[in-house]
Amino acid sequence: MEQPPKSVAITGASGYVGARLLRKLEDEEDISKLVAIDTLPPTVPIRNMAAYRMSVIKPIDDALSRHNVSTVV
């Protein structure tokens, strides 16, 4: 049984590891949306990405629910 496409949120998306992970996940067929969360703007252009400049210290529920996120990294 095929599973529906996922939305994945990446915290620290503007850092070295976060940016590399975004690039890696961009080509995954089972991921429909990447949600980048960081206090700085994204450092790489990624298709199907929603970027949020915020700290994870503050509630991020709105960003996660708006994109129906199933996974947070």
Image (cartoon, grey):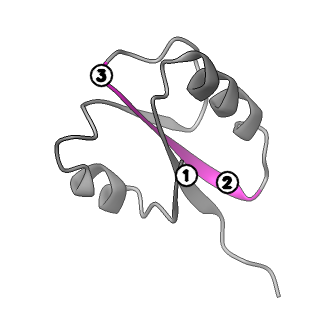
Quadrant of the drawing holding the N terminus: bottom right
Asked if the stretch drawn in magenta spans residue 32, the answer is yes
Q: Is residue 40 left or right of residue 1?
A: left
Residue at 16% across / 43% down in the picture?
58
Q: Are marks 2 and 1 in contact (CB under 8 Å)?
A: yes
Give SS at disc 3: loop
Magenta span: predominant SS is: strand
Relative to 66, say whether 19 is above or below. above
Q: Residue furthest right?
A: 1
Relative to 38, say whether 66 is above or below. below
Q: Residue furthest left?
A: 58
Residue at 25% across / 49% down in the picture?
60
Q: CA distance from mark 3 to mark 1?
A: 18 Å
**x and y, in percent, of residue 72 in the image:** 49, 53
Q: Is residue 40 left or right of residue 14?
A: left
Kind of residue indicated by mark 2 = Ile
Q: CA distance from mark 2 to mark 3?
A: 23 Å
Instruction: Give the labeled residue for mark 1.
Output: 8
Q: Marks 3 and 1: which is nearer the front?
A: 3
Q: Are marks 3 and 1 in contact (CB under 8 Å)?
A: no
Instruction: Give the labeled residue for mark 3.
Output: 39
Instruction: Specify which label sits upstream in the sequence, 2 or 1.
Output: 1
